[in-house]
Amino acid sequence: MMFNIIDPFIEEYCVKHSDEESPLLYSLNRKTHLQNLNPRMLSGHLQGRILSMYSLLIKPKVILEIGTFTGYSALCLSEGLAEDGILYTLDVNEEIEEIACEYFNKSEKAQQIKLHIGDAIKFIENFNQPIDLVFIDADKKNYVHYFKLVADKIRSGGLLIADNVLWSGKVINQDAKDPDTLTIREFNKTVAQDSRFKKLILPVRDGLTVAYKL
């Protein structure tokens, strides 16, 4: 179970003094909570505004999102897309396709969002375009592998963002030896030691890594 890294009242204050969700995002947020058994997997309002802000700052032409869920984070990231930009979002779960596509098709960026259902690793291995922004929020066991696959493909000045890097605080609990915690620790160490990137971890929700490609 994920716990709040930030005091809930502080987070509520931040949300109230940040931009509101668009009506489309609000609707998707609500529908996800009503219909999905794991709604906490959704990025949510505050993290969504963070993703949107980074995207707006660099105006990416190519975004690669690994892990779509119901499409909330993809919609947030798409807000900063260049006019001719494309967002590729990857997920292995066919059950999310209907709701994600429903909301993508309602978006102003509908023609710029491409959903791929299938093996993300094979997709990335065959992806040969320079990438401006990568967002990793998928199966934890492959976080290190995803990073190694995309690191060379991210252009200089591009961003890598990864979710769940504090893993409900388990990363600092030396008694936590479950596979996901061990993998997240390895991912954090791998990114921290990679001299190609400037990086920081933001204590937002479950932890957010932001790495800038030199």
Image (cartoon, rainbow, N blue to C red):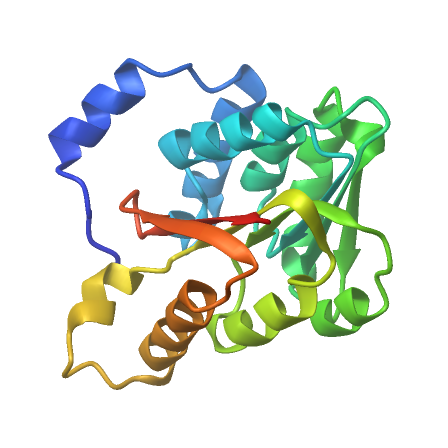
Seen at 15% across and 28% down, the residue is: 10
- The residue nearer to you, when weighing 196 against 204, is 196
Position of 151 relative to 28 (above/below) = below
The spot of residue 189 in percent (x, y) is 38, 71
Which image quadrant for residue 182? Answer: bottom left
The spot of residue 214 in percent (x, y) is 59, 49
Seen at 38% across and 57% down, the residue is: 164
The spot of residue 74 in percent (x, y) is 62, 39
- The residue nearer to you, when weighing 177 against 61, is 61
Which image quadrant for residue 167? Answer: bottom left
Q: Is residue 1 visible?
A: no
Which image quadrant for residue 111? Answer: top right
Position of 197 relative to 83 (above/below) = below
Tell me the quadrant of the picture where the N terminus can be found. Answer: bottom left
Instruction: Describe residue 34's horizontal placement relative to residue 107 as left or right.
Output: left
The spot of residue 108 in percent (x, y) is 74, 19
Exactly how many numbered labels are in the figure? 0
Instruction: Describe residue 92's horizontal placement relative to residue 23 as left or right.
Output: right
Position of 133 relative to 149 (above/below) = above
- The residue nearer to you, when weighing 20 against 135, is 135
Instruction: Describe residue 206's horizontal placement relative to residue 133 as left or right.
Output: left
Seen at 45% across and 27% down, the residue is: 49
Seen at 48% across and 41% down, the residue is: 32
Q: Is residue 65 visible?
A: yes
